Image: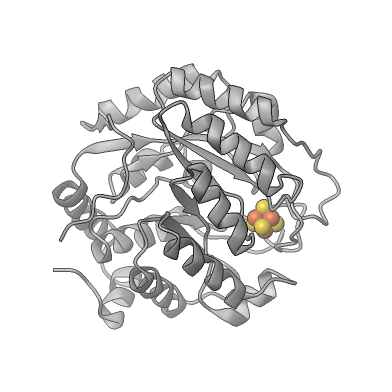
Amino acid sequence: MTITDKDQIIRLLAETPAEDVYRMADEVRHNNVGDEVHLRGLIEFSNVCRNDCLYCGLRRSNLAVKRYRMSEDEVIAIARRAADIGFMTIVLQSGEDLYYTRERMCKIIKEIKRLNVAVTLSIGERTADDYRAFRDAGADRYLMRIETTDRDLYHRLDPGMSWQKRYDCLMTIKDLGYELGSGIMVGLPGQTTESIADDLLFLSHIGIDMAGIGPFIPHPATPLANEAGGTLELALRTMAVMRLMMPDINIPATTAMESLHPEGRIMALQAGANVVMPNVNDADYSRLYELYPGKQAAHRSPAIGRSSIVAKIEAIGRTIGTGQGGHKKKA
Ligand code: SF4
């Protein structure tokens, strides 16, 4: 039985013992998407961003960040290396950096598609023509978090941005036939349980293919440095309830969960998640992509990082996905 009742969602988020919610989500995950864990190779190719989100270490007002941009050839070379070690999906992520014009992005996408992998973009708000061109170049999926459906909260936290514009971008992406990924942040200052329930209902309503839950972790170089932040339990619970509501979507065990607990991603895989996105950047770049403090960087080579997460996944009785791991919708 899929959950759609808001009061029930609120009870699951705030009252039902957490272990019970995790157990139910794990069972629903097993029954609907099986025991495979899909690995996506994440390339964070630029930490330049035109936006100023109050919670983010990469916000343009943070002058302490050493900014970097990879060349097209560098991105393609990292993708090739990731494909060589077995990644079947490459996720291209950056701040909102318009240096990567439509032409530059299309060149990168086309070259990576020659590696016979799925390409996911996570580069923020662009024009409809850009989204169409990226899709025509071969991009398969697009990730863009809505962050919160509380518009006042969104506009407070993302100055200069428009919730409606973000929503319109999501709808354009969906209409173009991408697999659509979105998600929210939990533990934001001023966010309520009811608001999180609304967010989950929103994600369910727009028919997403993937969704991630990120705990808000205050970054010391942002205006929210002294806020409390979200807990691992809130993030895991929200993710687990999302699994109960959307049984067949892809749900990543997010890196932010690992920043709150060394085994955070494994805990997430046992509470409804079925995707992990290891960073395949070189360590020097990884350290500079600090959305929040303590972000788990790729301190080792991507091959060693991959073997390490594979061993942990297999140790909990799960298997590694063999295909590209797209959303398999159940009727
Ligand atoms: S959250 Fe994304 S859009 Fe906002 S400042 Fe950070 S990188 Fe830029």
The quadrant where residue 316 appears? top left
Q: Residue at x 28, y 70 (%)?
A: 12
Q: Quadrant of the N terminus?
A: bottom left
Answer yes or no: is residue 30 visible: yes
In the image, residue 155 sits, relative to residue 57, either above or below, namely below
Answer with left or right where residue 175 lies relative to residue 67.
left
Q: Residue at x 39, y 68 (%)?
A: 203
The quadrant where residue 207 appears? bottom left
Q: Where in the figure is residue 176, as x and y percent of width and height?
A: 45, 60
Answer yes or no: is residue 290 visible: no
In the image, residue 195 sits, relative to residue 74, either above or below, namely below
Answer with left or right where residue 299 lies relative to residue 113.
right
66 or 263, nearer to the observer:
66
Q: Where in the figure is residue 123, as x and y percent of width and height?
A: 61, 50
66 or 84, nearer to the observer:
84
Q: Residue at x 36, y 74 (%)?
A: 201
Answer with left or right where residue 261 lies relative to residue 222.
left
In the image, residue 52 sits, relative to residue 116, either above or below, namely below
Which quarter holds ligand 1?
Answer: bottom right
Answer with left or right where residue 6 lies relative to residue 211.
left
Q: Where in the figure is residue 62, as x and y percent of width and height?
A: 81, 52
Q: Quadrant of the C terminus?
A: bottom left
Q: Where in the figure is residue 68, as x and y percent of width and height?
A: 77, 36
